Image: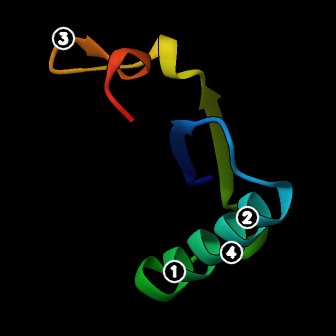
Amino acid sequence: MPIIRVEMLKGRTQEQKRALAEKLTAEFLATCGGNQASIQVMITELEAEDWAIGGELISDRPK
């Protein structure tokens, strides 16, 4: 059972996440084959204050 994990900042709509899951699943099948029903996509959303790049919280970066 393949699992595709996506970690991203909060802010996407349910429609965007649905489309992402559908496209990731389709691309996995096209590239690796397998059974569509066994492919799992897990989306984890994080607050900007919970993610750092280069030692700096994303929430502290200029917008």
Q: CA distance from mark 4 to mark 2?
A: 23 Å
Among the two numbered marks 4 and 3 on one chain, the one whose residue lies closer to the N terminus: 4
Q: Considering depth in this image, is 24 or 35 the residue closer to the camera? A: 24
Name the residue carrying label 2.
Answer: 16
Q: Residues within 10 Å of mark 3 (few under 14, many from 20)?
A: few
Labelled disc at residue 44: none
Which mark lies nearer to you, 4 or 2? 2
Residue 40: x %, y % from top left: 69, 53
Specify the label residue 27 is tagged with.
1
- Mark 1–mark 4 Cα distance, whole angstroms, equals 12 Å
Residue lying farthest to the left in this orientation = 54
- The earlier-in-sequence mark between 3 and 2 is 2
Q: Going by the picture, which residue comes out furthest to the right?
A: 14
Q: Nearer the viewer, mark 1 or mark 4?
A: 1
- Other-residue count near label 2 (Cα within 10 Å), few / some / many at <14 / 14–19 / ≥20: few
Residue tagged by mark 3? 55
Q: Look at 73% across and 72% down and name the residue there.
A: 19
First in residue order: circle 4 vs circle 2: 2
Amino acid carrying label 4: it is Asn
Q: Amino acid at mark 2?
A: Gln
Quarter of the image holding residue 29?
A: bottom right
Q: Which is in the foreground here, disc 1 or disc 3?
A: 3
Q: Is residue 26 left or right of residue 32?
A: right
Pointers 4 and 2 in contact (CB under 8 A)? Answer: no
Please give the residue where the numbered disc 4 appears in the rendered image: 35
* Above/below status of 26 relative to 56: below
In terms of depth relative to the viewer, which is nearer, 4 or 62?
Answer: 62
Give the Cα distance between marks 2 and 1.
Answer: 16 Å
At numbered mark 3, what does the secondary structure look like: helix, strand or loop?
loop
Say what secondary structure mark 1 lies in.
Answer: helix
Asked which secondary structure carries label 4, the reply is loop
